[in-house]
Image (spheres, rainbow, N blue to C red):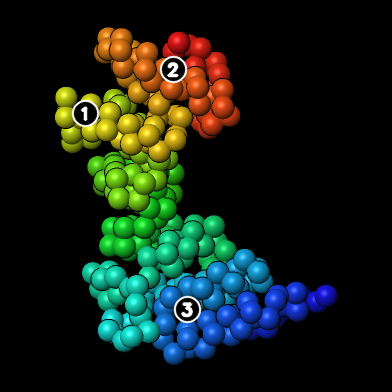
Amino acid sequence: MNKPQPGEIPQALDEEYAERVKTFSSDCSSGSSIACHQLAEYTSVVLSDFSTSFALYLKSCYAENDEGSNNQGLVNMGVGKGYPPSCFNLGRQYLAGRGVEQSDKEAFKALVRSCEYGKHSGACQFLGKMLSSPEPSQKDMYDVNRGLKAFRLACVEGGDTVSCGLAGAVLMNDNSEVKLRGEERRGVAEDMFKRGCEGGYARCCFNLAVMYNKCGDKEGFEKYSEITKDMVRRGEGAGVGTDNVRKVG
């Protein structure tokens, strides 16, 4: 079977989904940013047409500032409106150079819209990484406190356990640029790790055990050491090697 062209529907698709794709296309043309997003996902995943998906994500992210009934789900992005998931995927395409020339600067702008205005947890994790530990090409974006804020937003409001761990790690390193100090800093790190651990991310449980061990909290150390070991035994120890667990235990 020949590869379908943009706008065509693969023969292998069932009739119901084919009709949905036609509806996405029609609604997108009529101004629905959510439909544009759905059509972009189709063109990206099914057709591997990244140039078209880029254009659709761009349209959906930087939507016109109207209150039309076709644009439910858009949020105020500070300037105009936009659909946060589209801004996230747009940022990812800029980062990877898929369907568009690679640009950290444009990716950053799209991720800011998705995270700081749209509170999209995936975008906040990407943005936090760019801000707190940038590549040389991203040095102008470095702002560890803004990055920490992005991680915390993804953790607390989005339930993103990896971001919980990243926020805790930023707080527990020796970076003097982090504004939080002393017990407040330790308390926020503890909260981030606990949220991640309770969400099933073993790395956060492990880091809690390390934290309590360093400060002499035997009860806390034993509790989270056992939780970590149990998760590893169940095959749920992503990010934690058995050698590390032995060192803590």
**CA distance for labels 1 and 2:** 22 Å
Which residue is found at the position 39% from the left and 45% from the top? 160
Q: Is residue 153 above or below residue 46?
A: above
Q: Give the mark toward the camera: 2 or 3.
A: 2
Question: What is the three-letter code of the residue carrying label 3?
Answer: Ala
Q: Is residue 108 visible?
A: no
- How many neighbours does mark 2 have within 10 angstroms: few (below 14), some (14-19), or many (20 or more)? some
Query: Which of these two is toward me, 16 or 125?
Result: 16
Which residue is found at the position 39% from the left and 32% from the top? 197
Question: What is the three-letter code of the residue carrying label 1?
Answer: Gly
Residue 35 tag number: 3
**At which x and y percent is residue 246?**
51, 12
Q: Is residue 156 above or below residue 175?
A: below
Q: Give the mark toward the camera: 1 or 2.
A: 2
- How many neighbours does mark 3 have within 10 angstroms: few (below 14), some (14-19), or many (20 or more)? many
**At which x and y percent is residue 83?**
37, 70
Question: What residue is disc 1 on?
Answer: 187
Figure quadrant of residue 53: bottom right
**At which x and y percent is residue 3?**
76, 75
Q: Name the element at disc 1.
A: helix
